[in-house]
Amino acid sequence: MSEAILKPVAMPAPISVKELLPWVIFGGLMLLLAIYFVGAEQGAMSIFPGMYIHEFVHDGRHLLGFPCH
């Protein structure tokens, strides 16, 4: 019987919290910005005049459960 030869397994390098934190903060800010535009960009809360943003994200509003009309 032949013996099995074990090959070294490549393990991924761990990512430190210090390296990951800026990306988590950036992703969180982008998520909050997206939620604002989908959920609140119309009427009295509107930053941009007109209904352009509302119409652009209209189907997404309904998909996520935000009422708009």
Image: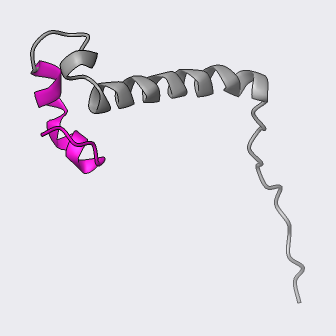
Q: Colour scheme of this structure image?
A: one colour
Image x and y of residue 44, in percent? 23, 17
Q: How many marks?
A: 0
Give the image quarter of residue 5: bottom right
> Residue at (85%, 66%) from the top-left corner?
6
Q: Position of residue 37 (x, y in %)?
A: 29, 25
Tell me which secondary structure the magenta stretch mostly adopts. helix
| Viewer-closest of 67 and 33 | 67
The residue located at (79%, 30%) in the rendering is 16
At 28% across and 18% down in the image, what residue appears? 45
Residue 48 included in the magenta stretch of the image: no
- The answer to whether residue 65 is left or right of residue 49 is right
> Is residue 59 part of the magenta span, yes or no?
yes
Residue 14 placement: quadrant? top right
Residue 12, given in percent of the width and then of the height, sits at 74, 44
Image: 61 above or below 8: above
Please give left or right for residue 23 compared with residue 47 in the image.
Answer: right
Quarter of image, res 36:
top left
The single residue placed furthest to the bottom in the displayed view is 1
Q: Nearer the viewer, residue 6 or 53?
A: 53
Image quadrant containing the C terminus: top left
Placement of 64 over or under 24, stated as above or below:
below
In the image, which residues are magenta?
52-69
Foreground residue among 4 and 18 = 18
Image coords of residue 48 (percent x, y): 20, 10
Looking at the image, is 34 positioned above or below residue 45? below
The quarter of the image holding the N terminus is: bottom right
Answer with left or right where residue 52 lies relative to residue 37: left
Front one among 5 and 23: 23
- Give the residue at the far front of this rendering: 44
